[in-house]
Amino acid sequence: MDLIKVMATGGGITKGGPPVWQAQFTTRELRLVVEEARRFGLPVAAHAHGTEGIAAAVAAGVDTIEHCTWMGRDGFDVREDLVTAIAAQGIAVGPAASPDWRGFAERFGRERAEEMFDRIRWMAQRGVRLLPGTDAGVSRAVFDGFVSSLEFFAHLGMPPAEIIGLATTGAARALGISHDTGRLATGHRADVLVVDGNPLADLRALRSVRLVLAAGRPLDAELRRHGAL
C-alpha cells in the first residue's frame, strides 16, 4: 500500500450516493484516518468537492486535496481562510483536470468553466501548490492523454518549466517519494522520459516520446521484469 485516499465528500457517480458538495466524514473521523496513515508512513489524499469536506480535510492535516472545487449546497462557497491554511500547511491541490478539459468547458459552458478555472488560478497565486493528474475512471478521462492535462496548467498561465516541475519534483514530494524519484540525482531511480524537441519551450514536445526509462531500464524491460508483459 502506497497511499490512503478518502472520499471526504460525495463523488457524484455512485447511484444513490451523497451529492458532491456533502461531507461524508467529520473532522474527527478524518483526523483518525490521517493519524493511522502516519503510523505506517502513508500520505492521505482527500477527494473533496464541497467546502465543508475541504474544511474538515484541512483541519485533519491531509497531504493532498483532489478537486477542491468549493461547492456548497446552493452554489460555490470559496473561503479565503481555508485557502490561506492550505498554503500554510503545504497541502497540495490536484484539480484532476481531465485530458478533455477543453470539451468539459464547452459542455459545462465557457463562462462557468472559466469561473472554475479562475479559482484554481487564484489558489496558485495565493501560494497553494498544484498537482497535475487526471480523474481517470470517469468519462473521457483516459490514461494516455496526460499531456493534455498538463496543457490545462498552461491555460492557467503557467510556463512549461513550472508545469514540468509540478509533474516531476512536485508530484513526488506530495506523494512522499521525493527521496526516490522526481528528479535526476545520485541515489534516485533514474526514471527518465526522452522526447524530441524541448518541452521547456513547448509542452507539445512531450507527445514525441523517444524513450522511457524506469529505474534506469527501458520501460518494456522493466515491465517484463515485474511480469507485466
Image: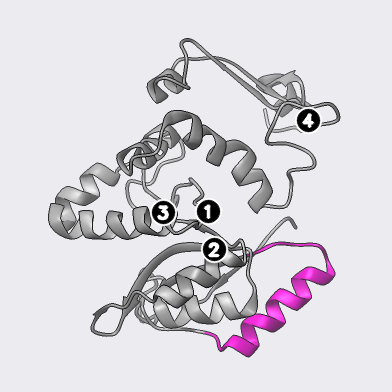
Q: Residue at x 46, y 22 (%)?
A: 206
The residue where tag 3 is placed is: 125
Q: Which residues are magenta?
A: 25-44
Residue 182 image point, x, y percent: 68, 36
For badge 3, the amino acid type reads: Gln
Q: For the point 41% across and 54% down, which residue is it?
A: 125
Q: Is residue 68 left or right of residue 139?
A: right
- Tell me where residue 13 appears, x and y as whole percent: 37, 68
Residue 8 position (above or below residue 96): below
Q: Quadrant of residue 41?
A: bottom right
Characterize the local packing of mark 3: few (<14), some (14-19) or many (20 or more) Cα atoms within 10 angstroms. few
The residue type indicated by label 2 comes to Ala
Query: Residue 156 vs residue 62: left or right?
Result: left
- Whether residue 95 is visible to the viewer of this picture, yes or no, is no
Circle nearer the N terminus (3, 2): 2
Is label 3 in a helix, a strand or a loop?
A: helix
Q: What amino acid is labelled 1 in the image?
A: Arg
Say whether marks 2 and 1 touch (CB < 8 Å): yes
List x then y, in percent, for residue 174: 64, 52
The image shows residue 223 at horizontal and vertical percentages of 70, 28
- Secondary structure at badge 1 equals loop
Which residue is label 2 attached to?
87
Q: Which mark is residue 129?
A: 1
Amino acid type, residue under disc 4 in the picture: Arg
Residue appearing at x 67%, y 21% in the figure? 220
Give the color scheme: rainbow, by chain, secondary structure or one colour: one colour
Q: Is residue 211 above or below residue 226?
A: above
